[in-house]
């Protein structure tokens, strides 16, 4: 029986090894800073490179008082944002004085869609009136396998904000749902339900 011996000494010429990216790590793909913007859209980079994409929302502040931060999806490169969606939404609330605490199912202003092509409200209303201009919303949205053409496209979102209903609230909205299409999702848009996004940062990551 013969023995095969490897005599390949090419490793000796290697001067550096490639950097390994751990599975599950996030790769920053794009950052957009809103400045009195009517909307923020991502029309490139949402493709088959990654099986999951995460969007981070940092200090989202509306130009119009008591408006909702919303999103919608596109299957035609951003020509139309009208993908059919169904979702459920839960909210937890606590005031600064703990005078009101609630855990509830949300039905307010497109918080729960049922086979709707309209915008989905990721947040509750964000106040900006006198004395409330320091309020904003922060959170994440994760979209799973947007380029797949076999299954519907699931998403989950968590938004945290402060709000005013006569007293100051800590208000969190948690959403889970799906875009009811087997077509590839290749663009996403964020906007307020009325008026512009006065300021805020939105980052898009691919998940390895």
Image: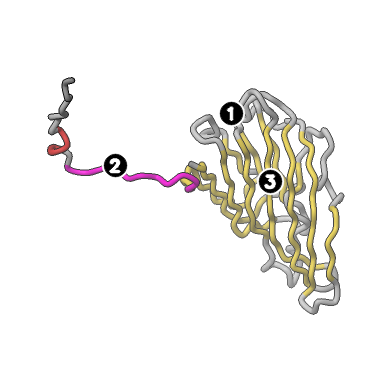
Circle 2 is placed at which residue position?
18
Can the viewer see residue 158 in this picture?
yes
Left or right of residue 63: residue 4: left
Q: Earlier in the sequence, mark 1 or mark 3?
A: 1
23 inside magenta stretch: yes
The residue sitting at 82% across, 33% down in the picture is: 115
Q: Residue furthest front?
A: 1
Whichever of labels 2 and 3 marks the residue nearer the N terminus, that label is: 2
Q: Is residue 208 above or below residue 98?
A: above
Please tell me in which quadrant of the rendered image residue 1 appears. top left
Residue 76 seen in the figure: no
Q: CA distance from mark 2 to mark 3?
A: 33 Å
Left or right of residue 118, residue 150 in this image? left
Distance between mark 1 and mark 3 Cα atoms: 17 Å
Q: Residues within 10 Å of mark 3 (few under 14, many from 20)?
A: some
**Residue 5: x, y in percent?**
15, 28
Give how far across and how far down residue 68 sits, in percent.
76, 52
Identify the residue at horizontal 79%, vertical 58% (top origin).
Answer: 91
Residue bounds of the magenta highlight? 15-25
Q: Secondary structure at mark 2?
A: loop
Relative to 153, 19 lies left or right: left
Determine whether, in the image, residue 179 is placed left or right of residue 148. Answer: right
Q: Is residue 34 above or below residue 184?
A: below
- Residue where numbered disc 1 is placed: 147
- Residue 201 is inside the magenta segment: no
Mark number for residue 156?
3
């Amino acid at each position: 029986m013969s023995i095969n011996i490897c005599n390949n000494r090419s490793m000796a010429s290697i001067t550096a090894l490639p950097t390994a990216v751990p599975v599950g790590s996030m790769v920053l793909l794009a950052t957009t800073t809103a400045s009195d913007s009517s909307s923020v859209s991502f029309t490139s980079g949402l493709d088959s490179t990654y099986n999951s994409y995460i969007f981070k929302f940092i200090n989202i502040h509306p130009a119009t008082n008591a408006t909702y931060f919303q999103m919608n999806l596109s299957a035609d490169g951003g020509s139309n944002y009208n993908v059919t969606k169904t979702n459920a939404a839960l909210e937890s609330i606590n005031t600064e004085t703990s005078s009101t605490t609630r855990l509830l199912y949300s039905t307010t202003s497109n918080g729960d869609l049922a086979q709707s092509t309209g915008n989905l409200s990721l947040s509750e209303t964000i106040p900006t009136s006198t004395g409330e201009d320091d309020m904003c919303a922060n959170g994440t949205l994760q979209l799973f396998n947007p380029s797949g053409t076999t299954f519907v496209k699931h998403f989950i979102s968590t938004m945290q904000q402060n709000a005013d209903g006569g007293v100051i609230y800590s208000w969190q909205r948690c959403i889970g749902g799906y875009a009811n299409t087997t077509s590839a999702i290749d663009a996403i848009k964020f906007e307020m339900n009325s008026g512009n996004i006065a300021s805020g940062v939105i980052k898009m990551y691919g998940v390895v």
